[in-house]
């Protein structure tokens, strides 16, 4: 026992002297920004949100068999209206609510493109609620509380150019609603002022 304790203490001292990261050096979830998270692309490649630093990002959990699936077309409208000014739309397919996303990968990407003309960024299917939720969604709850978590498909989070979570919109709020557009335009103005 004494040898094990001595070995552990020696390793801890060496780690501190060499400056190796320890658990206490990890950023607490609540202190992270969206840029600290990574999704995957439908083909499995990484999609780090840090790739979008300096741009606002609208993250929406989607489902192609949901009664709100018309919002997939609304997302393309936003893409058409704001992509050239810097807005990034990230659709995160999820099967968490009513099993309404049977598709995955390239099949899902092809469906959204053919049916809705989708040219916005599509992530791989991810969990957005519960213990298995993607870390981004767990983080979002630390930012705005439990009332801001997804309760159904097409929940929307707006991320500012600096990676902070600046707003959220519930499922029934269409992506093209005035209040969503106003929030996006505010972030686009912030982006221009910071550049």
Image: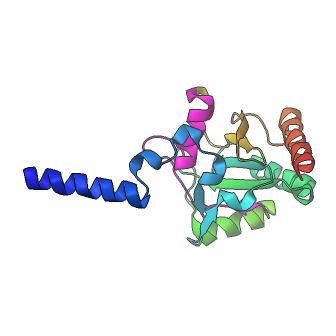
Occupied quadrant, residue 145: top right
Above-or-below relation of 98 to 21: above
Is residue 138 one of those drawn in magenta?
yes
The residue lying toward the viewer, choosing from 115 and 2, is 2
- Residue 187: x %, y % from top left: 85, 43
- Residue 141: x %, y % from top left: 57, 35
Q: Is residue 100 visible?
A: yes
- Residue 85: x %, y % from top left: 92, 55
- Residue 47: x %, y % from top left: 63, 64
Q: Is residue 150 visible?
A: no
Q: Residue furthest front?
A: 17
Name the residue located 62 percent from the left edge and 71 percent from the top edge: 106
9 horizontally vs 175: left or right? left
Name the residue located 87 percent from the left edge and 52 percent from the top edge: 77
Above-or-below relation of 31 to 10: above
Name the residue located 89 percent from the left edge and 34 percent from the top edge: 178
Name the residue located 79 percent from the left edge and 55 percent from the top edge: 88
Specify the segment rendered in magenta: 120-146
The color scheme shown is: rainbow
Occupied quadrant, residue 10: bottom left
Is residue 131 one of those drawn in magenta?
yes
The residue lying toward the viewer, choosing from 178 and 114, is 178
Above-or-below relation of 179 to 98: above
């Amino acid at each position: 026992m004494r040898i094990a304790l001595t070995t552990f203490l020696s390793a801890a001292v060496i780690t501190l002297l060499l400056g190796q990261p320890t658990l206490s050096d990890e950023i607490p979830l609540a202190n992270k920004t969206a840029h600290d998270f990574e999704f995957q692309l439908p083909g499995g490649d990484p999609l780090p949100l840090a790739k979008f630093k300096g741009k606002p990002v609208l993250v929406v959990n989607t489902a192609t068999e949901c009664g709100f699936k018309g919002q997939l077309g609304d997302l393309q409208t936003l893409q058409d209206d704001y992509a050239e000014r810097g807005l990034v739309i990230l659709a995160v397919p999820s099967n968490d609510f009513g099993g309404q996303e049977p598709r995955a990968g390239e099949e899902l990407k092809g469906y959204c493109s053919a049916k809705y003309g989708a040219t916005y960024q599509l992530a791989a299917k991810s969990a957005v609620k519960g213990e298995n939720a993607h870390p981004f969604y767990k983080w979002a709850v630390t930012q705005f509380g439990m009332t801001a978590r997804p309760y159904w498909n097409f929940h929307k989070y707006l991320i500012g150019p600096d990676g902070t979570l600046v707003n959220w919109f519930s499922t029934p709020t269409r992506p093209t609603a005035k209040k969503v557009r106003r929030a996006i335009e505010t972030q686009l103005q912030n982006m221009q002022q910071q550049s």
